[in-house]
Amino acid sequence: MATEQVLPFSVASVVEDVLQQHNTRSRPIDLASRKAEEASLRRYEAAEWLRKTVGVVGGKDLPAQPSEEEFRLALRSGIILCTALNKIQRGAISKVVEGPCDSDIIPDGAALSAFQYFENVRNFLVAVEELGVPAFEASDFEELGKSARIVNCVLALKSYGEWKQSGARGSWKYSGNFKPSSFTGKPFMRKHPEPFLNSFSRTSSAGEKSLDSEQASNGDLVLDLNEAGSSRNLNILVRSVLSDKKQEEIPMVVESMLTKVMEEFERRVASQNELMKTTSKDMETSCPPNKSLPRTASADVEMDGEFPINEKKIEESAKQIKEKVNHDEESEIQLLKQHMLVEQQQRDLQELKETLHTAKAGVQQLQMKYQEDFSALGKQLHGLASAASGYQKVLEENRKLYNQVQGPKRVYCRVRPFLNGQANCASTVDNIEEGNISIITQLKYGKEGRKTFSFNKVFSPAATQAEVFSDTQALIRSVLDGYNVCIFAYGQTGSGKTYTMTGPKELTEEGLGVNFRALSDLFILADQRKDNH
Ligand SMILES: Nc1ncnc2c1ncn2[C@@H]1O[C@H](COP(=O)(O)OP(=O)(O)OP(=O)(O)O)[C@@H](O)[C@H]1O
């Protein structure tokens, strides 16, 4: 991990500082002016080649010796670049959006024409990449863009064109300042303009930061593109210092320079370590461990070269990251548990709903069953009420019979008619009147006397068996209600007791006596009451 913690480090800047501090016998060097002069010369060269390639009309917007801004403005439409590329590589760009006059026609022409320019630039960058020519970024056309990369691309294109004109012998190689491998910008795709637009929409400073961060993340120790041609500048610097030296002085001067460079390197590395320590402490207190790593915190420090970051710091950072990851995992587990708990509760709730639904259905069934039972019970009660009504009638009748039974003993008197052969006999019965009977008696001294006897009822000799039974029938029915009833006949021999209770010797229906009639009536009565009990 320590080997990955490598940050860009500008060798040229160190050497420059050393040379400026060296103060040898050489004359003072104006590096900035040398850089600007060289950049201007390269830009003029690129402009001249473009004007020559696209012609006077095509290159009318591009001065022969343009300033950096004039150079960018002239090329940003992509028309000159695409035209030049098509000149040296026919059909490299199939369609070139010509003329900014479109913006005069279309109301929203500014944005649309800009988009058309992007198409040109995008197609150009794709084409040059396919040729193996070092490209640049669309944002280099902006005010703070790196026009040196555009110049480098044009000069590379020029070199490519010259190579083709000379017969394309061997393989073409460009030995310009910018190495294709060092270009870390994203390659353009012909069919998808979105990355291109995103790239263009970035500001120059943002683009630089992105570039630097990509370099840092790739872990490559590359020359910083912010100092375009730094190796070239370094070469110029060294040559300038050594130009006025004698051959025998050069080794000594070089040795001295190297010593100074090493010292400067060591000093910068030491200060860098200090800065990283401070930054790490700040990160621990202010930044979440998983969102800002030590390498990104120090990424704004310009470095050129490789050195391992303090392993202790790295271990601490790794520990923090691990703790954060563990914390995140625990949070995720907690979240997962909560999610599972919620799902379980939802399932329980659903089960409760189903149970409630089942219970409701059961209650409804019970209600229906109860209604049916109540209905059946009502019918039974109605039957009972009817039965009770019948029972009341019977009870009323029984009450009546009971009242009758509760009265005094009944005594009846039946007078037997004369039997055959007794027609001439005189009757002693003088008169029968309801419950009274008068008897003629023989008094002393030959005088007739009369005696009257009272009974519950007196049956005359004409009374039938049915008439005698009718007065005893109610008493006999009390037997079925649990009352004891006794009927017996009393009288002298031959007075008709057997006849009354049983009947004559030759029984007929009319001659049936009380016993037969009573039993028959009781059986009939029992059959009638059978339905009510
Ligand atoms: N009401 C009547 N109508 C017609 N015949 C009757 C009547 N009562 C009795 N007799 C007749 O009188 C006769 C005597 O009657 P019954 O035998 O019933 O008398 P009894 O009181 O039973 O005599 P005993 O005490 O000797 O047995 C019988 O021949 C009977 O048929």
Image (cartoon, rainbow, N blue to C red):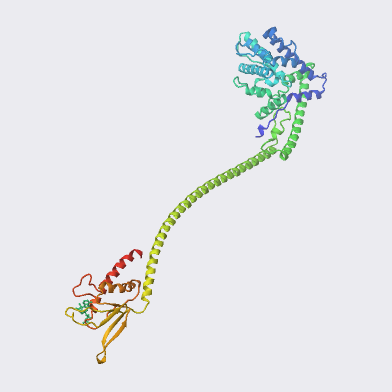
Mark yes or no: residue 184 visible: no
Using residue 228 as the reference point, say whether residue 514 is left or right of it: left
Q: Quadrant of the C terminus?
A: bottom left
Using residue 82 as the reference point, say whether residue 397 is left or right of it: left
Direction top: furthest residue: 56
Residue positioned 57% across, 46% down in the render:
341
x, y percent for residue 428? 24, 83
Quarter of the rendering containing residue 491? bottom left
x, y percent for residue 81? 67, 14
Quarter of the rendering containing residue 247? top right
Q: Is residue 174 above or below residue 202?
A: above
Mark yes or no: residue 437 visible: yes
Residue positioned 59% across, 43% down in the render:
333
Using residue 372 as the reference point, say whether residue 116 is left or right of it: right
Q: Nearer the viewer, residue 178 or 444?
A: 444
Quarter of the rendering containing residue 27? top right
